[in-house]
Image (spheres, rainbow, N blue to C red):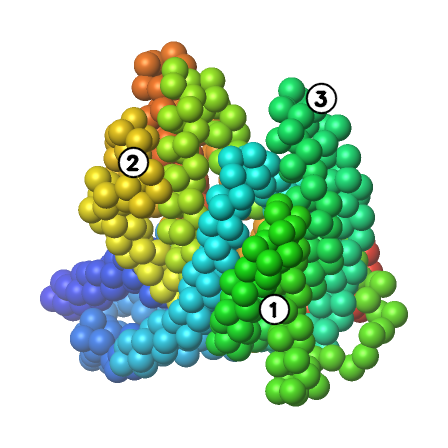
């Protein structure tokens, strides 16, 4: 009897040791995201990474088979108890209550079933994101070159035209283009998730709603632009500069219409992973931009008016070429039936996404305009404002790369959530964030390498050269935070959570970055350098906050939200309100 009891205790100890070790490994895997809804495979003795039985499970099965029921022992082994096996695999962080409810409705994640498949899938995800991002980078560079061409022609017209045109462009960005761009992003999660869910008709309806929304928004913007001269004079601007800026904006009014079409069309194509045709259309439009400027500015002598009209003309060329491509290729057939009265319904879901997206974009755009205003209050405003202009152009150039990655990740995450594949969406987010850190390091290396020569392409002024050289390494450090946080914003858009992004931008840029910038510049003696250190503080806090939010994302629950979002045409306003207040 004593010998049997001792033997059973030894058996219990071995079984307990095996289970404890296995539970520890399982929890470590859980922390790094390897365990999820495939715990049932582990319970059966299957390694979710390799598809084979692990040595630890073999030990457990062997012990259960040989020693679970010793005939000489009156005691019962743990493995014979009726307690649920799930208790042995309790996660360190409890799952959302919605997770278990989602399990019967969600496809199993192919990324977690086989280790070899996982590596192949990651490779394919990198390829998928790259196929979207690289054409967008080229498109961004082309559109950036368009603005540079316009500035070169403005510079040829003299100082007054350059000052008036620059003021008008800044005013248009703040009061018009940033708003239209932000509102258009509201359609991105809807179209991305609808495409993944194969609810193609929702893309066409959302496109119609977005165009209508932007056109309606353009009306008060146009009214504001018409009275720009009065506003500028009230703010103390020079009368001649205000008159030149007013002339530029009046001839830019048709651009509000072209932008109201261009932004939704680009998102409509991008959410279907169609980006290369957009690049080809951009090449066509930019090739015509130089001769159009030459005709209007040099031949017809329209001056600032010609610069504004050439930009409008180029945008209409881009819109027309996109529409021609959509019609000729026939991609509209599965997404577009006709102009429907359905576009007048379901605005609740679009506005709940568009307004926070607009706020998020505007908060970031306006930061740089505020920095230019603060430069005018520093010790040497002429040099600091000029250097700030060069540096903002530099950051705009660098921003093309993380923003393109952000758009591609948003598309991939939205498509996978719409297709009810949470694991795939998570992998897309991880791959995108990994790529963003690489971009950040490259941007830092670029900024440090060119710090002594970059400004010489714009000016020979020694003060401006010194200020630019001093701040460029700080900009490189800013990009270490900006690239991941920009990509994180893309993940949030893909999961239809723009409110979170807007709150992060508001808190980090204006409650952290702005006080740091003002304090260092005007009270701590850092002057111009302090403004960029404030931006560094904003970007760093933004990146950390964004990563924390993404780390706690419940991807199974996001699939449920995606399902609800793509079915918004049949949801009541009350149901939609509950969805988007989550």
Left of 370 or right of it: where is 124?
A: left
Q: Nearer the viewer, residue 497 or 204?
A: 204
| Local secondary structure at mark 3 | helix
Left of 381 or right of it: where is 446?
A: left
Residue 348 placement (x, y as % from top left): 77, 55
Of badges 1 and 2, the one in the foreground is 2
Q: Nearer the viewer, residue 272 or 251?
A: 251
Q: Is 78 situated above or below 170?
A: below
Left of 262 or right of it: where is 549?
A: left
| Local secondary structure at mark 2 | loop
Residue 45 placement (x, y as % from top left): 30, 77
Pick whichever of labels 1 and 3 is earlier in the sequence: 3
| Local secondary structure at mark 1 | helix
Residue at the (77%, 40%) spot, across then down:
226
Residue 579 placement (x, y as % from top left): 69, 55
Q: Is 339 situated above or below 507?
A: below
Pick whichever of labels 2 and 3 is earlier in the sequence: 3
Residue at the (25%, 61%) spot, across then down:
25
Residue 12 placement (x, y as % from top left): 21, 64
Q: Dividing the picture into quarters, in which one does residue 68 lie?
A: bottom left
Residue at the (30%, 61%) spot, across then down:
29
Residue at the (42%, 64%) spot, across then down:
137
Which residue corresponds to mark 1? 318
CA distance for labels 1 and 3 = 37 Å
Which quadrant of the figure contains the N terminus?
Answer: bottom left
Which residue corresponds to mark 2? 460
Q: Residue furthest top?
A: 523
């Amino acid at each position: 009897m004593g010998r049997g009891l001792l033997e059973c205790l030894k058996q219990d100890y071995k079984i307990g040791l095996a289970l404890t070790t296995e539970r520890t490994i399982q929890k470590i895997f859980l922390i790094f995201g390897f365990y999820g809804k495939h715990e049932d495979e582990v319970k059966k003795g299957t390694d979710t990474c390799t598809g084979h039985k692990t040595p630890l499970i073999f030990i457990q099965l062997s012990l259960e088979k040989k020693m679970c029921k010793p005939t000489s022992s009156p005691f019962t082994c743990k493995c014979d108890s009726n307690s649920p096996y799930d208790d042995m695999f309790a996660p360190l962080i409890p799952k959302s209550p919605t997770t278990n409810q989602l399990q019967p409705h969600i496809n199993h994640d192919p990324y977690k079933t086989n280790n070899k498949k996982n590596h192949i899938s990651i490779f394919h995800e990198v390829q998928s994101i790259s196929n979207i991002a690289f054409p967008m980078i080229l498109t961004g560079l082309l559109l950036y070159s368009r603005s540079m061409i316009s500035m070169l022609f403005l510079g040829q017209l003299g100082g007054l035209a350059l000052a008036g045109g620059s003021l008008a462009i800044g005013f248009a960005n703040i009061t018009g283009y940033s708003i239209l761009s932000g509102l258009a992003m509201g359609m991105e999660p809807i179209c991305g998730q609808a495409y993944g869910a194969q609810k193609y008709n929702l893309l066409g309806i959302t496109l119609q709603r977005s165009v209508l929304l932007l056109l309606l928004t353009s009306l008060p913007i146009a009214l504001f632009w018409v009275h720009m001269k009065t506003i500028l004079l009230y703010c103390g601007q020079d009368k001649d500069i205000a008159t030149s800026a007013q002339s530029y904006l009046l001839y830019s009014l048709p651009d509000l219409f072209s932008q109201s079409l261009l932004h939704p069309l680009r998102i409509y194509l991008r959410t279907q992973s169609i980006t290369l045709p957009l690049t080809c259309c951009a090449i066509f439009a930019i090739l015509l931009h130089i001769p159009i400027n030459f005709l209007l500015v040099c031949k017809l002598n329209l001056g600032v008016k010609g610069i504004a009209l050439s930009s409008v003309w180029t945008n209409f060329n881009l819109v027309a070429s996109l529409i021609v491509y959509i019609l000729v290729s026939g991609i509209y057939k599965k997404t577009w039936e006709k102009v429907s009265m359905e576009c007048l319904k379901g605005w609740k879901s679009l506005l709940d996404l568009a307004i926070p997206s607009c706020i998020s974009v505007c908060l970031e755009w306006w930061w740089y305009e505020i920095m230019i205003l603060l430069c005018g209050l520093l010790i040497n405003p002429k040099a600091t404002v000029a250097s700030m202009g060069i540096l903002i152009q530099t950051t705009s150039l660098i921003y093309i790369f993380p923003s393109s990655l952000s758009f591609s990740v948003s598309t991939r995450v939205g498509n996978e959530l719409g297709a009810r594949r949470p694991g795939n969406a998570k992998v897309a987010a991880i791959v995108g964030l990994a790529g963003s850190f690489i971009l950040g390091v490259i941007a830092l290396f670029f900024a440090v390498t060119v710090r002594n020569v970059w400004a010489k392409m714009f000016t020979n002024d020694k003060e401006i050269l010194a200020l630019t050289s001093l701040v460029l390494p700080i900009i490189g450090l800013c990009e270490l935070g900006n690239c991941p946080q920009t990509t994180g914003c893309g993940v949030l858009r893909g999961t239809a959570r723009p409110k979170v992004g807007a709150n992060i931008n508001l808190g980090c840029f204006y409650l952290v970055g702005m006080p740091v910038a003002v304090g260092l510049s005007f009270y701590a003696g850092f002057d111009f350098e302090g403004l960029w250190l404030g931006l560094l503080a904003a970007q760093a806090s933004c990146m950390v906050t964004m990563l924390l939010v993404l780390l706690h994302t419940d991807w199974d629950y996001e699939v449920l939200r995606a399902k609800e979002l793509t079915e918004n045409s049949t949801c009541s306003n009350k149901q939609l309100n509950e969805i988007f207040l989550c």
